[in-house]
Amino acid sequence: MASDIPVLPECEQMYKELQANEFQYIIYKIDMPNSEFIVDEPSRNKNWNEFVYNLPEDEPRLIVYNFQFERDGVARTKIIFINWVPKPAPMEYKKVQGAAKGTLKQSLKVVGPEIQAEWPSELIYETVLERVAR
């Protein structure tokens, strides 16, 4: 299913700022009335648990996150793409985001790992670390 939902220039600009370490993460959402991607929340907060706790319980979001970890004694960073689709979200929103996430990922040129989650328990730091540190 292809998507014709546009990615606003502001979305791409914010992603460039994330790549330059200006932000820890950026949460994007689809503005349903206007059918376009918008920046919902950029953040400098480095606390993973707070980030997960503050995700909306009933609305999907797409997130790019500067994920920091240590492997073999070396500090590393990978930009990851998180497809947050909470179970209680309306089916219409889930379908639209499912069809459109590739458009955002391609527009931003995100090449890091993609994590999909329906519940906060799927975003426990150690669980995500296992997928990212491969």
Image (tube, grey):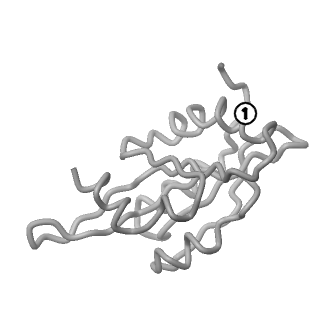
Position of 57 relative to 31 (above/below): below
Residue 70 place in picture, x, y as percent: 20, 70
Tag 1: Cα neighbours inside 10 Å, few (<14), some, or many (≥20)?
Answer: few
Residue 2 place in picture, x, y as percent: 65, 20
- Residue for point 21% across, 50% down: 134
- Residue for point 43% across, 43% down: 110
Question: What element does badge 1 sit on?
Answer: helix
- Residue 76 lies left or right of residue 44; in this view the side is left
Point out the residue furthest to the top here: 1
Residue 27 place in picture, x, y as percent: 62, 59
Closest to the observer: 57 or 44? 57
- Residue 29 lies left or right of residue 73; in this view the side is right
Position of 54 relative to 112 (above/below): below
Residue 56 place in picture, x, y as percent: 71, 64
- Could you tell me how many numbered marks the image carries? 1
Q: Quadrant of residue 5?
A: top right
Closest to the observer: 91 or 40? 91
Point out the residue furthest to the left here: 72
- Mark 1 lies on residue: 95
Instruction: Report the quarter where the N terminus lies.
Output: top right
Closest to the observer: 114 or 7? 114
- Residue for point 57% across, 58% down: 14
- Residue for point 65% across, 53% down: 28
Which residue type does callout 1 highlight?
Lys
- Residue 12 lies left or right of residue 70; in this view the side is right
